[in-house]
Image (spheres, grey):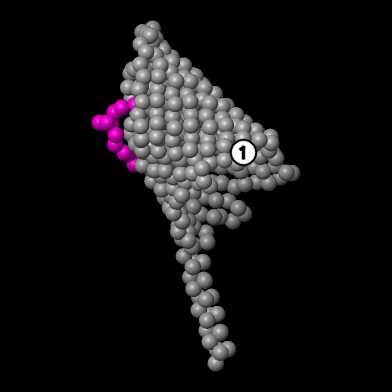
Amino acid sequence: MQKKLLVLCCACIMMIGSQLAFAGQTRVGGQLKLTVFDYADGTRNSLATSGYTGFQFTEADLYFNQEINDKVSVDIEPAFEATTMPTPGFGRNVGTGLILPSAASVSVEFRRALVKYLLPQGYELSCGIIKPRFSWEYGAELFYQDEIVGGKSSQNDLLGAMRDSGVEVYKSFECCGISLPSYVYAVNGLPSSAQFGAVYGDNNRNPFLMVHVEPEIGALKLLGSVGYGTWDALDIKSVNRWAAGLDYSYQKWNLRTECFAGAWQGMGSTGQDVLPLGYYAKLFYRVNPWLRAMLHYDIVDQNYATAVPGVYAPGRETYQTITPGVQFQVADSAQFIVQWDIANWRQTKASGAVEDLNFNRLVLGWRVVF
Ligand SMILES: [Ca+2]
């Protein structure tokens, strides 16, 4: 009798186990970002102003992953972001954007909403809103670990940032001690969310094609992205984008650097080509397990002046920013981040009018991953 009972129990456990294996697991997580102090002080041409704000909700992202079976899974990642304007910008005095109670609303978008298929021989196919891995800083979301406010070169839809929907094929190749994670993309090819709204639709009848690789040789990691498509509704005007990166670790030091460029044929407001160029380098020193120091140099040079988002008027803008910072690892998944931006930004309009923004900005904030 005891033997029969044992067999029955084993059969039940196996049945339940097989059901769980088939259903897979649902994983839920996310991150929360808050600033507790944000202060800016500087000049707009010769006019000196300053401003600060206290606690501000910045961002909350949720992450849901469900395994449909052992081959198919679904990722959904809604992001809730505060639509405030704390960063100084051309057209307004330094610090004025920090107090904007009327603009304190929250926008929602999907970072990811995709179905992933595990194919034979280690290939992975993802379809949906996929956030292409164009750069480390934005695509692989590395800046979250370093700064509350990311750099000008990476948080730019025409440089390091790419948000799009379509198809991603991934496989990691291994050969002679070299690891080569590789990605191929066919996405809608939206030039920027500011110009074309959200990332959910297509802009024309051709896909934007991109290849992305990240060779890894010991402590040295490299990154390369090359993409081509057409950006206009008539499928005539071309867009080229590329990114290159290097990451090297030695003892307590880590250096990460990336450069980004793009060329949008005839996308300017007077039909001129839009040619942005961006570069950054971040040097980190791990003082101890809970404290890391950072020095971030960031520069953007673009052949247009933007007064209205998505309108690329003739002119020139350069953004040079140096950001010392520290990150305190308060718990396994909680960081207190301090960053000090030292910015020299210049806008030159076609009329010859020049606007110089020189400011310092201190941001203290929390990032918690759960
Ligand atoms: Ca397209």
Residue at 38% x, 46% y is 78
Helix, strand or loop under label 1: strand
User: Farthest residue in the right direction?
Assistant: 176
Q: Position of residue 41 (x, y in %)?
A: 40, 19
Q: In which quarter of the image is residue 310?
A: top left
Q: Does residue 249 appear anywhere in the picture? A: no
User: Farthest residue in the left direction?
Assistant: 102
Q: Does residue 120 appear anywhere in the picture? A: yes
- Left/right placement of residue 262 relative to residue 292 reads left
Magenta-span inclusion, residue 99:
yes
Residue at 48% x, 38% y is 336
Dot 1 amino acid type: Asn
User: Farthest residue in the bottom direction?
Assistant: 1
Q: Nearer the viewer, residue 152 or 94?
A: 94
Q: Where is residue 290 in the image (x, y as percent from the top left)?
A: 57, 40
Q: Position of residue 298 (x, y in %)?
A: 52, 24
Q: What stretch is highlighted in magenta?
A: 98-110
Q: In this view, does 60 lie above or below 345?
A: below
Magenta-span inclusion, residue 287:
no
Q: Where is residue 339 in the image (x, y as percent from the top left)?
A: 48, 29
User: Farthest residue in the top direction?
Assistant: 352
Q: Nearer the viewer, residue 32 or 5?
A: 32
Q: In which quarter of the image is residue 182?
A: top right
Q: Where is mark 1, residue-wise? A: 288
Q: Nearer the viewer, residue 289 or 70?
A: 289
**Could you tell me how many numbered marks the image carries?**
1
Quarter that holds the N terminus: bottom right
Residue at 55% x, 51% y is 124
